[in-house]
Amino acid sequence: MLKSRKLLSIITIFSLFGQIQLFAQNTNDFSKASVSIKYHNRAIYYPGNSADNPVNVHITIKNEGTETLRFKLADDRAFSLDFNVFTVKNTRLPNTEKLIEKRTSNTTVYFRELALEQGEEYSFIENLKDYIKIDDSSVYYLEMNFYPELYKSKFVSINSNRLTLEIRPSPSAASSSYIPVSAETAEILKPEALAPDKIVEQTIIARQKSLWDQYFLYMDVESMLKRNPNLKKKYITVSAEERERMINSFKADLMQSRIENDIIAVPEKFQIEKTTYTPTEGSVIVTEWFKYPNYSEKKSYTYKVRQREGIWTIYDYSVVNLGTE
C-alpha cells in the first residue's frame, strides 16, 4: 500500500512536470516586445460622448529582440488590451458598462496570430472612451496593458509608456463668448491651412482693426501664457477647468494692454522680410513701424510658428528695436 502511494506520488510529480514543460514550450518569450502609445490626431478632449469626441490612441507593438515575436490579436481589441486611467490622486477610472458586459458575456473571441521579425512593428488605433468612463474634466494619467495571449490570459501582459490626458470642461453657453465669430457674417471662425507668413499677416491685420477673435485665431495662447515663468508654474499644477480660466484671463489682460505690450502693439505698417520653416516649425521675420506724436519707431519681430494637424499657429516671439525715424 505504501509503495502504491509512493508510485502514485512519483507519477503525479512527473505529470505536473510534463505539464509545466509543455506550458513552457507553448509560451512565447515576450520580454523583448515593447508596446508604446501616443495620441492620434490629438485634439481638445471633453467628458463623455464617445462618438463625437473620441480620444483616439495610436498603439504600436514592436519586436525589440532577435527572435521572431509571435502573439495573438483579437478582432475585437477589447480582448487584447486594457486602458488604465488614473487621477492625480492615483484613483483609477472605471471601465465602461459596454466593455464590462462584453467581457462577462459568453461569446466566441476571434483572433489572428501575428509574427514580427526583428525591428518590425504593428500598429492600430483605439478609442479610449470605448474602454473608460470619463465623466469629469481634469488632468489624468493614461497607460495601457497589452495581452499577447488575449484577455483570458491576463497573467501575460506588456505595459506601455504613460501619457498625460487633459479633459477640458464641456463647452457651454457660459463660454460661448470665447468662440471666434466673424463680425460681418456671425459665422464661427475656423483656422485654415495657410502658410506661416499668411497667418502672421492675418494676425497683425486683425490687431490693426481690433478684431480680437480673428487676432487669437492663429495664436497658441497657452504657449504665450507659459512664457511667463510664474504663470507657467501655476498652470501646470492646476485642474483643466482652472487652466481654462487662466487662459481666458490671459486673453482679457492682453485685450486690456495689461501684459505683453509688444505682441499687442498696433503697427502703422509692416513688411514681412523672411519666412523659413520645416514641416513642423518655422519663423517669420517682420519689420513693423509704430507712429507716435513726435516720432516713428521701427522694430523687427520674429514670430515663432508651429504646425499641428495642418494648421500653423504663433507660439512665441521676440523683438529687436531698430531705432527711430
Image: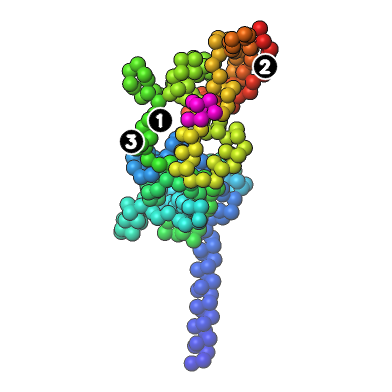
Mark seen at residue 321:
2
Crowd around label 2: few <14 · some 14–19 · many ≥20 (10 Å):
few
Task: Compare residues 183 and 188 and report the one nearer the observer.
Answer: 183
Q: Please name the residue shown 57% across and 38% down the image.
A: 231
| Mark 3, residue position | 173
Q: Position of residue 275 (x, y in %)?
A: 60, 15
Magenta range is: 252-258
Residue 126 position by quadrant: top left
Q: CA distance from mark 3 to mark 1?
A: 10 Å
Residue 212 position by quadrant: top left
The disc labelled 2 sits on which kind of residue? Asn
Q: Is residue 227 visible?
A: yes
The disc labelled 3 sits on which kind of residue? Ala
Q: Please name the residue shown 44% across and 35% down the image.
A: 43
Q: Is mark 1 in CB contact (under 8 Å) with mark 2?
A: no
Figure disc tally? 3
